Image (cartoon, rainbow, N blue to C red):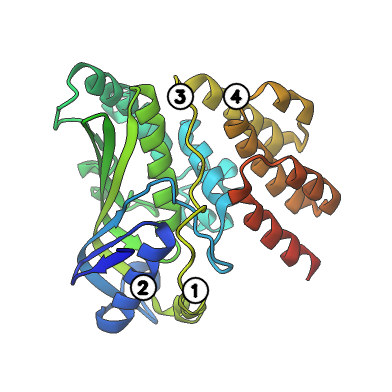
Amino acid sequence: MLYEMTDAHFAAGTLDDVMRLAVEAIEARGGQIFPTKNKTTGALELIGVLLEIADPRARLSQTETRGKIFSALGELCWYLARRNDLAFIEYYLKDYKDSADGDEIYGGYGPRLFKWKEKNNLNQVANVTEMLRNKPDSRQTVIQLFDANDIVEIHKDVPCTCTLQFMLRRGELHLLTYMRSNDVYRGLPHDVFCFTMLQEIIARTVEAEVGTYKHAVGSLHLYADDHQIVRRFVDEGWQPTLGIAMPRMPLGNPWPEIERLLEAESEIRTTGKFDRNALETVDPYWADLIRLLLVFRFKTDRDWDSILALRGDIVAKVYLPFIDTLLRKLSS
């Protein structure tokens, strides 16, 4: 069965299918609220929702309206680089400037995941990984992102994600995310991409396979200003469920390759230059991600020829529709 739908549980094989189920339910029976971010036109909301994706690698929205792998990959790199500075993430997502306290994003996840200063430079990812190795059946392998101190003072950006619970069972690493609030159209695709990538990274680190991904949300909402574009997303119809998952992350410790990815990302973003010949020594999985970062850079520079050349080098064909959509937009 492709999917099932209950009052507050939406389960499907892919991100797009889960999003479509959730959007239709919000439009049909969501309650109206007027949150801080949109006091004028408001939003529709469902309370206490569980989204479930059977294949976490089917984390990419393939639709014309929502397929944005480049910004999602950029945000993941921002997390993995342990950064919360505006300059980095604004390169990929301009709207982040509205959430900045000066030159930083107060609620940025990178430092909270890897070097939370308020918690004595706590590396939560390392601690959870070590516990998974030593106590595979543990129920304490939880990463905390929202903190009690976050609402003591007013900040423009407070983490929407409360916890990430990793559970290693019978050789598979499952992830249950809990979010206090989530925008079903703008925020959800990026969150699912980043968290399932982290799930797969930790799974590979502890020599496990990827299990299921469950995404629980206190307030799953759709802003009124987005109704028209979301309706276009729904009208695109159901996407094929085969051949749209990202390839499997290579076996073995992924962190050396992640460091190479982050080094390449920094060079591409800050200088606009990168020696593509260096990719010959990089595993194809990670080389493709670097190529996507280069495509985004060439898009900024409107360098069509270089994008076309990179398209020919892509190994995983699942990424080609994103590049083709970009080329169509550049030519229009």
Q: Percent x, y for residue 93?
A: 56, 53
As drawn, the label of residue 169 is none
Secondary structure under badge 1?
A: helix
Residue receiving disc 4: 260
Q: Residue 251 carries which label?
A: 3
Q: For the residue labelled by badge 2, is the local secondary structure a helix, a strand or a loop?
A: helix
286 lies above or below 11: above
Q: In this view, does 156 lie to the left or right of 212?
A: right
- Cβ–Cβ below 8 Å for labels 2 and 1? yes
Q: Is residue 224 above or below residue 191?
A: below
Q: In which quarter of the image is the C terminus?
A: bottom right
The residue that appears at 27% across and 41% down in the rendered structure is 175
Residue 111 versus residue 295 in the image, above or below: above
Q: Name the residue under label 1.
A: 233
Label 3 close to label 1 by CB (< 8 Å) = no
Q: Which residue is drawn at 67% across and 62% down?
A: 325
Q: What is the spatial separation of the Cα atoms under label 1 and label 4, in whole angstroms?
A: 35 Å
Nearest the viewer among 195 and 17 is: 17
The local crowd at label 3, few if under 14, some if 14 to 19, many if 20 or more residues have their Cα within 10 Å, is few
